[in-house]
Image (cartoon, helix red, strand yellow):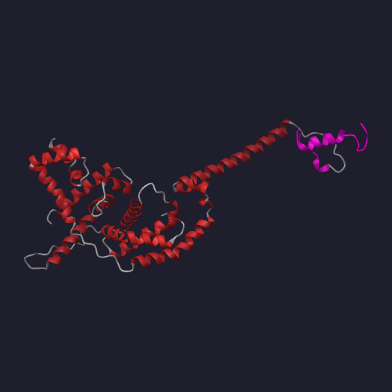
Amino acid sequence: MQAVAGGDLDAFGELVLRYQGLAWKTAYRFLGDAMEAEDIAQEAFLRVLESASRYRAEASFGTYFYRILTNLCIDRTRKRPFTGMDNIPEMADSAIGPTESLIQKERGARVRAALDTLPSNQKAAMILRHYEELSYAEIAGILEVTPKAVERLISRARASLQARLSHL
Amino acid sequence: MNCKKVLSRLQAYVDGEVPAKLRGEIEEHLGACPLCRSEAERIRKVGDVLDSLSVPPLPEGFSARVMAEARRRAPLATQKRSFLPLEWRPLRWLLDLSAPMRVAACAAVLLACLLGMFMSKELSLHQERQAPVAELEPLDGFEWFSPTPPASLGSVYLTYASVAPPTGENP
């Protein structure tokens, strides 16, 4: 990061290569749209570059990067209209004989819709915990809350998801 | 350990976020309590369902697009930095403040300057009112010293010049 702060674009390029997978997956899981996810992941890297001179190594770079990315995802979610569960495809009747991949796709769409009904902070906590496998302490650092608050966010998120996805 | 206590920490237990001692106690309870065990299973099942959410592969050329945009923005960022005296090390603390705090800090400095100017003006007027301007006879060539405020350098010089013996005369 020191090299990036000094304007070293090669060092910045290395950061991009190292964290691009993480940025893409997290943004996609949060937003569920490829174009938006790419846009947000790119913006997260550019924010890192622009604020490199102000970066303090108080937390790990990973935590710092997740924080930027998560905040961008939350902002983007707030700006778009809520669609709720309206756009979910009807579950295919397995007796009719749709392919397994189609069922899987529909299952994914239901999970996507259920995640989208969660409040942004619960959704962020759940994604960081379940998919990124971060600890409560790491998530607390990213969301700037206490680990206990993270536990509560995840607990509420799970209860909500459980209610919506119990049929799967 | 009772069910209430176990259920309150069950999420953390499933996530591997409880200390070893508590983990052992919870496991012991789960072994004996089918109700809490089924609740733990339900929590784990949510995780299994979430795994069905797939993510497409990273779009091709992503890093190249990020780098292109970075190169486009980098000169602007450098220019911005070079014009900002805030990059000067002693003022780095100002950059770490939030925007409202920065405005407040600048306003405080401005207020302090204005107050200083106002107080110095008041003090000067007060001194002038208390001690009238010395009635010293201006010497030829020193008219621009007159009138001189008391205890000023001009006043001292005029006083000295008016009593000093002519040049070349022996004491």
Give the residue at x 51% y 51%.
B86
Left or right of residue A36, residue B128 in this image: right
For the N terminus of chain B, the quadrant is top left
Q: Where B25 falls versus A68 (above or below)?
A: above
| Magenta stretch: includes residue B168 | yes
Name, please, the residue furthest toward the right: B169
Q: Where B139 falls versus B69 (above or below)?
A: above
Q: Is residue B100 visible?
A: yes
Work out whether residue B74 or residue B116 is closer to the camera in this orientation and state it.
B74
Find the magenta span and give its range: B143-171
What is the quadrant of residue B171 in the picture?
Answer: top right
Left or right of residue B37, residue A66 in this image: right
Image position, residue A47 (x, y; %): 40, 57
Image position, residue B156 (x, y; %): 79, 35
Left or right of residue A142, residue B132 in this image: right
| Magenta stretch: includes residue B86 | no
Work out whether residue A32 or residue A4 is closer to the camera in this orientation and state it.
A4
Left or right of residue B64, residue A109 in this image: left
Q: Where A139 falls versus A27 (above or below)?
A: above
Q: Is residue A163 visible?
A: no
Image position, residue A103 (x, y; %): 13, 64
Q: Where B59 falls versus B23 (above or below)?
A: below
Give the residue at x 49% y 48%.
B92
